[in-house]
Every structure is written in C-alpha cells, then in structure tokens.
Image (cartoon, rainbow, N blue to C red):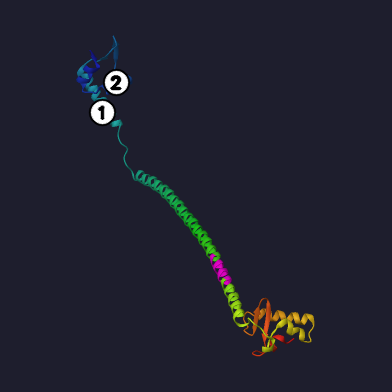
Amino acid sequence: MQLTIDEYSKQFKMSKEMINSRLRAKKLNYLIDDAVTYILVDDISTHIKDKKVEILQEKKAIVKPKTTVGTVIALYQRENTQLKEKIIQLESKIDRLIDDKEQMLRDERDKIEQLYNKKDEQLKNILELVNTKMMLEHQEQTIHEVETLEKDNISDIKPELGIVELKSHLKTLNLKSYQRKVIKRRFLSVYDNDVRVVHKEGKLYLDFSKYDYSDLLSY
C-alpha cells in the first residue's frame, strides 16, 4: 500500500515533521512519483504495532539519568565556583570605585588647598598695602604737625631768648669735626620724638632756657 505524507499522518496520528524526519533517517520505505512522496506500507495493523514498538523503544532510550549525590555535589561545586568568581569580580569593582573616590577626594583637597593658599597670599598683599598706606599717612601727619609747630612757635628765633641753632652751637664747642657730625646725627635721629628739639627749614634749634641737652651733646 502507498500513502502520501498527509494520508500517513492522518492514519498513524503523526506530525508531518516527525514523518519527514523518519524519511530522512530512512526509517520508512518510500518512493517518489511525479514529485509526490509515497510511503510504502505492507499491512496497516502490523505497521501500527511495529511503529508503537519503535516509539516505545525510542522513549526508553530517552531516559533521563538518575540524580545521584555525586551529581548534586558537582552541581553545587560548580555553582559555588561561579559565585566565587562573581564575588571576586564585584570586590574588584568595589576596590576600583573606592580608589576612584579617594583620588577624587584628594584632587578636591588639593584644589581647596591651592585656592586657600592663593587667597591667603592675596590677603597678605592687601594687609601689606594697608600697612604701607597707614605708615605713609602717619609720616605725612607727623611732618604736617612739625611744620605747623615750627610756623606757630618759632616764626622768630632770637638768640637772646636762649634759642640757638645746633650747628652754630656746635661750632662754639671744643669738638673735632667728626665729633660734631656724631652729635648732629644724634639730634637728627630723635627730633621727631623729642620736644626739646625744634626743626625748621632743614635746621635744628635748641632752647637752653627751657631744656637741658647734656645727654645729646655729651661725647
């Protein structure tokens, strides 16, 4: 008997894919006539029995292996190994992240220190400028006060009142030239702070009627 693939599928309750698979494996006898595949069947009942036996044998052949203790242990060991590898990878990533974070913090700290040092240097410069300005203002004020004092108090200096010029007075003393220079420098160094010494138009004046100059004139 000759059956087409559709007829064979309906007769033996098999899918066309399984039939084609058996044809390729040459488990079924067939012939091709005018591009149509015919499966050769001697006796349908006998063929059904043979096919049932064959299917049972194939099912028995496809038996899942029994799970043994060794298989379970091997499975757990493989899973543990995979977990350990994943843990190592995660720890490595965490270490890299920590290193990156620490480096970022160090860089930020360096930037803050540089900014602080820069601001500190700017502040120092500003303070120096302020101090310099204050010193200049103080010097100008002192000069102004001295000039005012000179104009108010010694507009008319008269020797008969006990006021004499330092240079003239030194000439009257029995001193050598270098000794007079030393004394004059001594007066120049203190006239800003010593009320006994009056400075006017580049000259120093002494008032012997009011003050004693023995400490400055001694040599």
Please provide percent x and percent y for residue 182.
Answer: 74, 80
Rendered residue at 22%/19% (across/down): 46
> Where, by quadrant of the figure, is residue 21 drawn?
top left
Q: Position of residue 69 (x, y in %)?
A: 34, 46
On screen, residue 152 versus residue 29, left or right, reads right
Classify mark 2: residues with Cα within 10 Å, few (<14), some (14-19) or many (20+). Answer: few
- Residue under label 1, please give it: 56
Look at the image and tell me in which quarter the C terminus lies: bottom right
Relative image position of residue 50 (x, y in whole percent) = 24, 22
Which is nearer the N-term, disc 1 or disc 2?
A: 2
* Mark 1 residue element: helix
Q: Position of residue 213 (x, y in %)?
A: 68, 88
> Would you identify the image quadrant in which residue 162 lies?
bottom right
Query: What residue is pinned by disc 2?
Result: 20
Q: Is residue 99 above or below residue 217?
A: above
Position of residue 82 in the picture relative to residue 1 (left or right)? right
**Res 186 label:** none
* Dominant SS in magenta: helix
Q: Which residues are magenta?
A: 126-136
Q: Is label 1 or label 2 in front?
A: 2
Disc 2 residue type? Asn
- Whether residue 32 appears in magenta in the rendering, the answer is no
Q: CA distance from mark 1 to mark 2?
A: 19 Å
- What quarter of the picture does the N terminus occupy? top left
Query: Residue at left 59%, top 73%?
Result: 139
